[in-house]
Structure formats: C-alpha cells, structure tokens
Amino acid sequence: MSTIDYSEKIPNNVDLANDRTLQRALEHWQPRFLEWWKELGPNDFANSDVYLRTAVGVDAQGWAHYGTVKMPDYRWGIFLADPIADRTIGFGDSFGQPVWQQVPGEFRSQFRRLIVTQGDTEPASVEQQHRLGHTCPSLYDLRNLFQINVEEGRHLWAMVYILHAYFGRDGREEAEELLARHSGDVDKPRILGTFNEPIEDWLSFFCFCYFTDRDGKFQLKSLAESSFDPLARTCRFMLTEEAHHMFVGETGLGRIVRRTLEVMKEIGSDGPEAIRRRGAVDLPLLQRYLNFWFSSSLDLFGSEVSSNAATTFANGIKGRPDETTQYQDHVCADSSFEIEVPDGKGGIIKDTSPMRNAMNEVLRDAYIRDCEIGLKRWNMQIKRAGYSFELKLPSNRFRRAIGAWANIPTDLEGRPVGREEYDRSMPGWLPGASDRDYVKSLMQRVVEPGKMAAWIAPPERGVNNLPVDYEYVRLN
Ligand code: BYC
C-alpha cells in the first residue's frame, strides 16, 4: 500500500517531492484554490471547529482519520488508489492490451474534455451550497454539509492533478478555468446544466446529494474503468469518499419522510395544509422536489445516442460501471440497444442504436434502477405508517433538456402532451413559487447540539460512533 506524505505542502501519494516541476505548478495553483474557497466556499464558517474526516491513506480498512479541523486548514491532497498489477484494458477496441500510464496523443482532447467536465462539477457543487450553512437543521447536518464541501474540493484537486501531470500547458490552463467558471454565472457558467441550479434550501440539498451525487457515482465508476490508469486510480479513490455524499442524501430524505409521518399521525391527517401548519414537508411537496432534481440529473448522462459516447467507449477512455463483473461483451462492436424516441407526431417509437452509441443510455438505465432503491425504502416507511401515498420517479422522458426528449412536453409518465396541458399541469409536477416560499420559511437555523429542526427527524446514529448530540461544529 502506498503511504501519504503529510509533511508536504500538498499531501500526496504520487511522489510529488520527486517531480519538482509538477510540484511547483501545483503549489502555484494551491493559493488560487484557497482564494476561491474563501470567496465561494462555506467561508462564513472559516473559524468554526468542524469534526471532519480526512483521507490519510488509500487502504480500504483505515483510509480516513476523524478530528476537529477549521475548514481552511483541511489538508486537500492528491490520492490515487493503489495500482493493480498487470492491469489490462477492460473494454473497447484495445480490449486485453496493457493499460496506459500516459495519455495517447490521439486521445488527448477526448480525455481532456471528460476530465475537465468531471472537474468542473466539483467546485460547482461547493458554490451551489455556499450559503446553506446559515440555515442548517442541526449541527449534525451542518457537519455533513461541510464534510461534503471539503471532499468536493479534494475531488477538484484530484482532477487538477491529472490535468497538471499529464496535459502540460493545456492542462494548467484548464485548471485555472475550473476556478474561473462559476455556478449560475450568466457569462461563465459551469459546464453541465444541473450544476447551475441554485441550492438554496436543505430539501434541495438532500435531493441533490441523492440524485446528482449518484450521477457522480456512475460517472466516476465509468472513468474508474478507463485505460488511462492514473485517471482510473484517481476515480477509484474518489468513489470511497463519494459514498458518504449519497448517504447524506438518502438518510436526509428518509428523515424528512419519517418526520412528516410523525406529524401526520399526531394530527390524524395527511392534508398538505394541516401538515404545513405543523411545519413539516407534505409528501406531494417532496414528490415535486424529487421530480425536479431527478429530471435535471437525468440530463447529466448526455444524449441517448451519442457519437462522443461511442468514441470514448471504442477508444477505451470511458467504460461502464463495473465493466468486468456486470457485462459479458466488453467490445460491443456488433450489438445494439433499443431506445424510445419521439416519432415527431406527438407519439413514441422504438428505435435501434448501435450499442456503443447508446452507452449514455445504458448508464442512465442503471442509474435509474439505483435511484429506485431509496424510493422503495421510503415507500415502505409510508406504507408501514398506514398511508397509501407512493413516491415515484417520473419517466426518463419528463422535462428533459438534453437528448431525444429535449423540450418535448410529456406528463410524469412520459406520455407526450400538448404544450398548453404541460404548462397548466406544471404546478402539480414541479415546485412552484409558493412551495419554494414555504420551504424557505422552514429554513431556520438550529445549532443546539442534538436538536433538530421541526421538519426533519434525528438521524439513527451520529458520525463515527459519536452520539447524535455531539457538538459536531463549534461555531466560535
Ligand atoms: N448539461 O453527446 P452528448 C459529479 C453536452 S457528477 C449541459 O449528448 P456525451 C458530482 C456535452 O458536454 C458527474 N451540457 O453527451 C456530483 C457535449 O458538449 P460538447 C460528472 C450537456 O458527450 C455532485 C454535448 O452536450 N462527471 O461528479 O456523450 C457533486 C453533446 O454531448 C449535458 C461527468 O459528467 C448537460 N446535462 O456525454 C459533485 C463525467 N449533457 O463537449 C460532483 C465526464 C451533455 O460537445 N463527462 N452535454 O461541448 C462525460 O462523461 C460526458 O461529458 C457527459 C456527456 C456524460 C456529461
């Protein structure tokens, strides 16, 4: 197992000390990163002591250390999972050949595009969550937000390292740009749509962690299959950290459902107005938030049929999650995939695409199945409490902005509908102004250890075996 050198200015397990040029370049980027963090990270809490986990190794057993840290002192570092001896290319035209330790010249721009896109999402999410700390529902949640923020910052470092180490001057310029684009900026927005959506309340935050971080899981798993070994190893380690982010989303939404069910039981009603009078989140409101974030996150997989996807698969650049264990055919040169597309007359037809071109859709399908798991769990909670309400994922055709269904109005079941019906039905499908105002009214900060806001139940357990009422953040 490789060890992490913490005596370095930039902790790393890539032997940075022996590459002075790269070390200098990254040390030059470091103060810019810190400036960005100060401006657009959770810097109003710079003086708070936060109980954080920090990566200290890449060993599955003991990779993290927990302790109290002021966020600006967090040690953002560069960690690659240990190499797999004699690893060979797992998919595409070069299947079975040794993996690459350098980027082949002919694939340079394709790799750069994907690495930049991946890197762009990390600081974007920190920017989106910039002000959430002020309205935390508990110290436990505040700590989780900050944990996610520092780790997304580290994931930015992970991509910046690859850009600096393997893409020369272009890579250094791209690394600067990663700090120059900003979420929601009209002139210089983040690359992918969802990362320009504001996250102004904790309901949105938990939905984002549940749906959007899960896209992160699928994309990182695909890049972890890459033939470019340093990228694969980087992404493998990022996935270790990523799991917690989805946990925060799933348990956050689960706790909201639990609290709502308690209120429904107390008042003996499932009427949204009555529930809102008690300061909880009615289930139809939650459903509208799920519709919003799920449909937005579906776009992150790109078009159903994509020549980019075909090329990156053929060239061994980006595979499918768990390529080795989940699939038999790793070349996919002759297979095909059936997709449903609009027929141009207000209906749906089946079309067949070469499998390689449909890789985005293969990933999206797997992602949707993964998203279903949490919903099943919450629906079970609702059923056990004696209610018939069922949370549902909308169709993958609903409210799409990318791909075959972009800007085609459909209902939640994915049936094409007229524009007028679509607009008329929207208040029932997506959060409207009054929903957002109500959710905003709930966002009152709760910072007494162990106390929770009225709209969310406490977690089942605290962090790292500590009690729920531990003072996870000392606000100073
Ligand atoms: N919004 O052939 P197409 C995470 C662009 S999340 C705006 O359809 P392709 C995280 C596309 O870029 C994971 N633009 O798709 C989560 C292309 O533009 P260019 C992030 C979009 O290329 C939470 C054009 O449309 N990682 O880690 O096959 C917190 C045509 O593209 C969108 C990655 O995404 C969109 N939604 O696939 C923190 C992995 N979708 O290049 C972090 C790297 C597509 O022609 N990225 N476009 O100007 C990729 O693998 C691919 O770029 C995509 C698109 C899957 C995103």
Image (cartoon, rainbow, N blue to C red):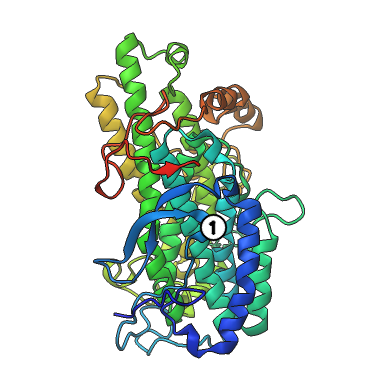
Q: As shown in the figure, which amino acid type bears the numbered disc 1?
A: Pro
Q: Residue 258: x percent and y percent?
A: 32, 27
On the image, which quarter does residue 363 sit in?
A: bottom left
Q: Is residue 462 left or right of residue 446?
A: left
The residue at 67%/69% (across/down) is 176
The residue at 56%/88% (across/down) is 20
Q: Is residue 356 above or below residue 40?
A: below
Disc 1 on helix, strand or loop?
helix
Q: Is residue 141 above or below residue 403?
A: above
The residue at 54%/51% (across/down) is 299
Q: Nearer the viewer, residue 42 or 338?
A: 42
Q: Is residue 468 above or below residue 331?
A: above
Q: Residue 147: x percent and y percent?
A: 44, 52
Q: Nearer the viewer, residue 327 or 273?
A: 273
Q: Nearer the viewer, residue 170 or 109?
A: 170
Q: Nearer the viewer, residue 342 or 150?
A: 150
On the image, which quarter does residue 456 sit in?
A: top left
The residue at 59%/39% (across/down) is 346
Provide the residue designation for mark 1: 72
Q: Residue 226: x percent and y percent?
A: 43, 76
Q: Quadrant of the N terminus?
A: bottom left
Q: Is residue 456 above or below residue 265?
A: below
